[in-house]
Image (cartoon, grey):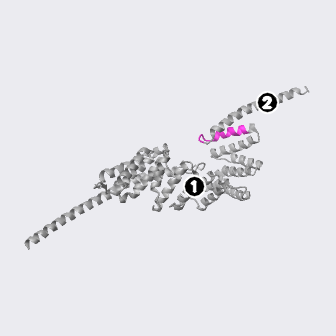
Amino acid sequence: MQYFRSVLYAYFLLFLVGCSTTKDKWVNRKYHETTAHYNAYFNGLEAFNDGVRTFEEKKKLNFEEILPLYNWPNEKEATVLFSKMDRALEKSAKVIKGHSMVFKGKQKNPYVVKAYLLIARSRFYKHEFIKTLEACAYIQDQFGNIEFAKEEVFWSKLLAAQTHIRMGNAFAAEPLLDDSYTKKLSKLRLHEAQKTYAYYYIKTGRFEEAQNWVSAAFETAPTKEQKVRLAYINAQLLAELGLGYESALAYEKVLELHPNNYDITFSAQIKRAENFDVFKEDIVIIEKELRKMLRDDKNISYRDQIYYVWGLKYLELEYFSEGESLLRRSISSSVNNNRQKGKSFLRLAGLEFDFREFVEAKELYDSALTVLPSDYPGLDTLEDRVSVLSELVFHYTEVKLQDSLQYLYTLSEE
């Protein structure tokens, strides 16, 4: 009986030791997870988000181009984010160095995995694309079989695809996208995958496929702001495909969403008018809208754009005199938009050129070149035309002068 009690007591002590060891491991794990989360990782993520948010708030939209699906900095713009991204990198490294827990070859601290993803994202915003790809590949290789890391692995694949596209290696992005996209994705991940597919097709110039993916992403967009952006891009892509009537209807859908950003609202109104089909609908419809826009005090600095679009509609109907008058009003009402002023000069010059009024056309082309920005598309071609016109006008003026003098010579002295 005494022997039995001794054996039972020994087993009990072993059980307590085992419990203590298990408890210590559990406490140790929770300590590292909590410390990693609420100290280093939290501060790193805050720095990253603050940098991105500040950049996006200052980023101005260019409605002359297809709006970007993502507000990412170019190489020059990335420099303003360096301090925030470096802090995110520093805190992420601290998480990995001080709180990594690898048991039986597997990472047990989920915040270490999150820290690696934050490193990849920070490198991406710093325009360090090779390092971004290396970080993404590490996440997939090391954590691909860990259940709690599935989300980070998904985001790393998507980020790697986006990085390849930005580097001009679209062919390397497609398999990553195909591997990531499944019907089982959560709504947020599904939305981001659809957006990245759209980004891929826009960058490769395949606008029909891009428009389909943008439409799909619109349906899954989690916020009103994202829906507005996607609806606007959808309308732009329809215009790129030559579907002007459908594009005008799509811009109406943008307006139905009541954008918070007035610049988007105004631009959607203008683009809707620009794509209005005067042969399918009465021009009176769009004239009524344009007059209403002119009366709105918020549009004082936008009147040049309103007159410009109105003039284009008249020119489509071959009301040349009315169209020319509206283009000149566009120029005279310009406040601070040299790009628009240049476009108005350019269209007016083209009109004079078509009617073989070469002297007037040359002067208007000169005016356009004076105000158009250096990145305006087709500027080289425009400069060539101006050069040819300059020579033509020189000879034309000389001939006109000689004709006048010779005619004068034929007159009597009286």
Residue 398 lies, in percent from the top left, at 77, 29
Cβ atoms at labels 1 and 2 below 8 Å apart: no
Residue 399: mark in rendering:
2
Residue 122 lies, in percent from the top left, at 42, 49
- Which residue does the image show at 60% across and 59% down from the upper left? 254
Element marked by disc 1: helix
Quarter placement of the N terminus: bottom left
| In this rendering, position of residue 198 left or right of residue 143 | right
How many neighbours does mark 1 have within 10 angstroms: few (below 14), some (14-19), or many (20 or more)?
A: many
Please, what is the three-letter code of the amino acid marked with disc 1?
A: Gln
**Is residue 189 located in the magenta-colored stretch of the structure?**
no
Element marked by disc 2: helix
- Give 248 or 180, whichever is nearer the viewer: 180
| In this rendering, position of residue 64 left or right of residue 5 | right
Query: What kind of secondary structure does the magenta stretch mostly adopt?
Result: helix
Quarter placement of the C terminus: top right
Per the rendered image, the range of residues in magenta is: 361-375
Q: Is residue 383 above or below residue 305?
A: above
Is residue 38 visible to us here? no
> Gap in Å between the C-alphas at discs 1 and 2?
55 Å
- Give 228 or 7, whichever is nearer the viewer: 7
Residue 211: mark in rendering:
1
Please, what is the three-letter code of the amino acid marked with disc 2?
A: Val
